Amino acid sequence: MNDSLTEAEKRFLLRVAREALESAAQGNALPPLDFSALTPRLKADGASFVTLTLQGELRGCIGALQAYQPLAEDVREHAIAAALQDPRFSPVTALELPHIQIEVSRLTAPRPLEYSTPQELLARLTPRVDGVILTDGARRATFLPQVWTQIPDPQDFLSHLCAKMGAPSDWWRKKPLQVSVYHVEEFHE
């Protein structure tokens, strides 16, 4: 990412995410953002994922693959969604708040990854760097680059991503899929 956030911008986004998380879990209204206090990067459209963990285990993760609103607002929106709307988990409770860690991933724009064979697809991926999006018609799934630490083998990575998409795990070997990659700038509390 060629326009990295400053440490102050990262701290600001983590604070915004924490405030949104706490407001959502406690059922309180979120105060409006003061856009006059935001830096140009925080005002610019940006795509983010917010990941919540509890004692090292995933507790929620929601985000956007395409930028459509100011980055600061995107982080707030996805912090709330990760807390309350991740279908894999029940909503975060106020009792969990002190134990939840927040991670923010700021995404680059996805770019198509052209390939001809399953072997070429494997060769073109960069483990631990590429976030990957698989699309097959109306089905789509993504793994952030951080998932490589849990699934380091590219074949397993693609198989798990196919399963997440609702397809057979070996679908990437049998059918040409639309593949895109992106990178992230990740930071956490």
Image (cartoon, grey):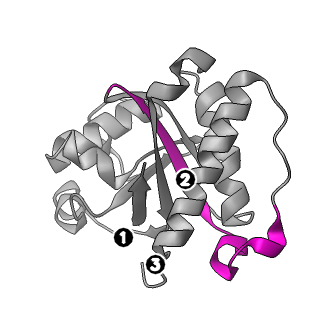
Q: Secondary structure at mark 3?
A: loop
Disc 1/disc 2 C-alpha distance (Å): 35 Å
User: Residue 72 magenta-drawn?
Assistant: no
Position above or below: 28 against 151 = above
Distance between the alpha carbons at the discs numbered 2 and 3: 15 Å
Query: On the image, numbered disc 2 is attached to which residue?
Result: 14
Q: Which residues are magenta?
A: 34-55
Find disc 3 in the rendering and name its residue: 4
Q: Amino acid at mark 3?
A: Ser
Residue type of the residue flagged with mark 2: Leu
Give neighbour class at mark 1: few <14, some 14-19, many 20+ (Cα, 10 Å): few
**Amino acid on which the number 1 mark rests in the picture:** Glu
Dot 2 or dot 3: first in sequence order is 3
Q: Residue at x 19, y 58 (%)?
A: 122
In x, y percent, where is residue 5? 50, 75
* Residue 111 against residue 168 in the figure, above or below: below
Residue 65 visible, this angle: no
**Which of the pair 4/172 is nearer the observer?**
4
The answer to which image quadrant residue 18 occupies is: top right
Question: Which one is closest to the eye, mark 2 or mark 3?
Answer: 2
Q: Which residue is tagged 1?
A: 114
Name the residue at 73% across, 57% down: 73
